[in-house]
Image (spheres, rainbow, N blue to C red):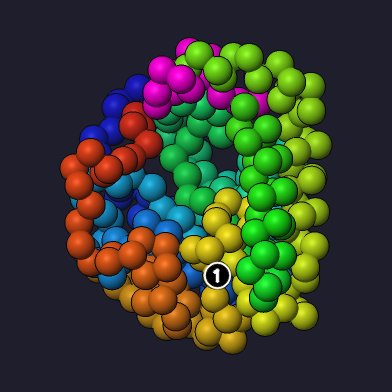
Amino acid sequence: MKQLTLPEIRQRLLNILIELDDFCEEHNIHYYLCAGTLLGAIRHKGFIPWDDDIDIAMSRPFYDQLEQLAQQNDTFHGHYKIVTYKNGTTHYPFMKVLDTETYTKQSYTNESNENSLWVDIFPFDGVPADVNERRNLFQRELFVRKILNLNFAKVGDGKTMGHRLIKPLFIPFAKLYGIDRANKRIDQLCRSYGYDRADYVGDIMWGDYDKEIMKKTDFDQPVYVEFEGHQFKTMSCWDKYLTDTYGDYMKLPPVDQRENHELKAWLRE
C-alpha cells in the first residue's frame, strides 16, 4: 500500500468534507465546522498547520436525520461510508464518515472496525441553563465516556507513565461494562434534556460543560467561513464559541501543546 504524506492526508479529509457537504445539501441537513476545524478556518483559513483531522457538529434533529439515512444505506458518493454504533460499524457514540479507499493506524487506540481516514460528526443537544445542573449532567456522561475509551485502549500506551501503569488495571472492568452498553448510556444522557425545549445547547457527548455551550437561537443561525478555499457553514456565535473553548484563540499555543493524532495512512490496494 502507498503511504500518504500529511498534505495528501489533508486532501483526502477535505474531499470527505466536500462530499459530505454535497450529500447533506441533497437531504437538507445542516452541519457546522466546529472544534479545531473551526479554529483553523478562522485563524488559518484552513487546517491548523500541525492538525490532521476534521470535526463537524449538527443539532440533534439533523443528526438523527443523518443517522436514519445511514441505517437505510450507509454508503454515498462511491466510497464514503457513514458509521454509527447503531449499525455496529463504530465503537464510538458519535457518527463518522470514512474514506474507505484509505487505511489508517493511530498511536493510542485499536480501531479495527473503522481504520480509514474519517470526519467526526458530533450531535449538539439541549443542556440545562443552570450551571450546576449542567455540570452534573456532563460529569455523569464523562464517567461513562472514560469507561468506553478503556474498551479500545492499547495496553502499554499512554501520554504519561502514570497512564501506562494504571490503564491495564481498569481495562477488564471497562470491558465487562461493554461498548454497546456504554454507547447506549451516553446516548441516553445526551438526549435527557431535550433539544426542542432547551434554551441552550452544547456537546454533551464529547465536550465540556463550560466550553461549547451557546444559546440555541445563535447556534441555529448559520454563517459561512472559509476553509481550504471552500465555503462551509458554522454557527453564528463562532467568536464566543472559540473564545469559550480556546481563550485567546488567535494566539498560537506553545509548541509542546500542538497535538495531533500521530496518524499514519495508506491507500488501499
From the image, give the main secondary structure of the stretch colored magenta: loop
Between residue 56 and residue 240, name the one nearer to us: 240
Could you tell me residue 236's position as x and y percent? Answer: 45, 83
Q: Is residue 31 above or below residue 49?
A: below
**Where is residue 104 shown, x and y percent of the image?**
43, 30
> Does 155 lie within the magenta span?
yes
Q: Quadrant of residue 192?
A: bottom right
- Relative to 267, 211 lies left or right: right
For the point 51% across and 31% down, which residue is it?
Answer: 115
Was residue 176 drawn as part of the magenta stretch in this picture?
A: no
Quarter the C terminus occupies: top left
As drawn, 156 above or below 232: above
Which stretch is magenta? 151-163
Residue 194 left/right relative to 118: right
Q: Quadrant of the N terminus?
A: top left
* Left or right of residue 164: residue 83: right
Amino acid type, residue under disc 1 in the picture: Ile
Q: Quadrant of residue 134?
A: bottom right
Residue at 33 percent across and 65 percent down: it is 247
Mark 1 Cα shell of 10 Å, populated few (<14), some (14-19), many (≥20): many
SS class of the residue under badge 1?
A: strand
As drawn, 143 above or below 235: above
**Residue at 61% of width from left, 33% of height from top?**
149
Residue 126, position in %: x, y? 69, 71
Q: Which residue is mark 1?
A: 213
Name which quarter of the figure residue 220 lies in.
bottom right
The percent position of residue 17, horizontal first and vertical second, equals 43, 58
Which residue is pictured at 48% across the width and 50% down the height? 119
Q: Nearer the viewer, residue 98 or 217?
A: 217
Depth check: give the residue in front, 156 or 221: 156
